[in-house]
Image (spheres, helix red, strand yellow):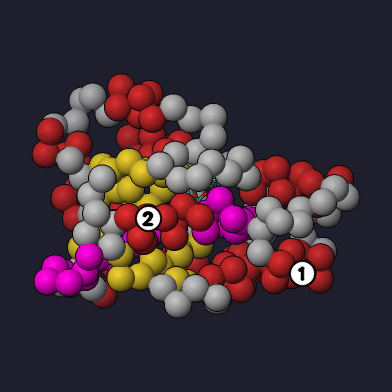
Amino acid sequence: MDKATSKGRTKRIGLMGGTFDPIHHGHLVAAEEARFEFGLGKVIFIPAGIPPHKTRKDISLPAHRLEMTGRAVASNPFFTVSDLEIKREGRSYTIDTVQEMRRLFPGNDLFFITGADAVLEILTWRNVIGLLEICSFIAATRPGFKLESLNKSLSHLSHQQLSKIKTLEVPALAISSTDIRKRVQEGRPVKYLLPEKVEEYIYLNRLYK
Ligand code: ATP
Ligand code: MG
């Protein structure tokens, strides 16, 4: 594992992209583990504007997802939220977001944190080769996903490109936003699947009903 402290090194910054509809403990555990294992100085959560890969029509308003993400990360001094994608007009592509972060943090190494399932989607992202030139990826394990199948799917990349994709074992949490939305819809409990302040916000604003 690529353990590193920020001492004597360029400060590393983690970027955690997602729809966060809603944000849950799976996201938070993965980001915290990545922060610790890769010596990240901070992790910036970036809720997606109009996610290019999502076809679901009823995605919650950006303002709701931004607010829930803010509430979820408030208690971690290493975590912050960016409204960069939400403020941008139209669809957000990861390459545009990372390029923007490059401009904002010119001297830092950027690490894009994703679930191992989502890293496979990078194969379909626009300009994946360019992306691997300006940031590294941290692919976190997720229940139901085998890391071996990741290696197979990435076999067309060069050794140099592959070295930019790092894997991370996180304590398995079989939590997904899809399941949480379904549970709220059906009146089943979501307590302990996500931060209490996010749960309160969902009920207060009658989301997912
Ligand atoms: P949905 O069910 O709506 O797709 P989700 O739970 O997958 O939601 P996203 O917002 O799509 O959440 O995910 C953002 C990022 O977090 C993705 O890279 C995803 O792979 C990762 N992620 C989500 N849940 C987990 C989890 N339980 N463990 C590790 N990574 C996760
Ligand atoms: Mg998802």
Q: Is residue 107 above or below residue 136?
A: below
Q: Is residue 11 magenta?
A: yes
Residue span colored magenta: 5-28
Q: Is residue 9 left or right of residue 49?
A: left
Mark 1 vs mark 2, foreground winner is 2
Name the residue nearer the viewer: 130 or 153.
153
Q: Residues within 10 Å of mark 2 (few under 14, many from 20)?
A: many
Q: Residues within 10 Å of mark 1 (few under 14, many from 20)?
A: few
Name the residue nearer the viewer: 179 or 64.
179
Q: Is residue 1 magenta?
A: no
Query: Of the residues under marks 1 and 2, which one precedes in the sequence?
Result: 2
Give percent across and percent down for residue 128. Answer: 26, 42
Q: Is residue 26 left or right of residue 202?
A: left
Provide the secondary structure element on which disc 1 rests: helix
Q: Is residue 27 visible?
A: yes
Q: Which residue is mark 1?
A: 200
Provide the secondary structure element on which disc 2 rests: helix
Q: Is residue 116 left or right of residue 69?
A: left
Determine the residue located farthest toward the right in the rendered image. Answer: 187
Q: Given the image, on which type of amino acid does mark 1 rest? A: Glu
Give percent across and percent down for residue 182. Answer: 77, 44
**Disc on res. 108:** none
Give percent across and percent down for residue 66. Answer: 57, 69
Q: Given the image, on which type of amino acid does mark 2 rest? A: Ala
Q: Are marks 1 and 2 in contact (CB under 8 Å)?
A: no
Is the CB of mark 2 within 8 Å of ligand 1?
no
Q: Which residue is mark 2?
A: 34
Residue visible at 24% across and 54% down? 3
Residue visible at 61% across and 65% down? 65
Label 1, label 2: how far apart the Cα atoms are: 27 Å
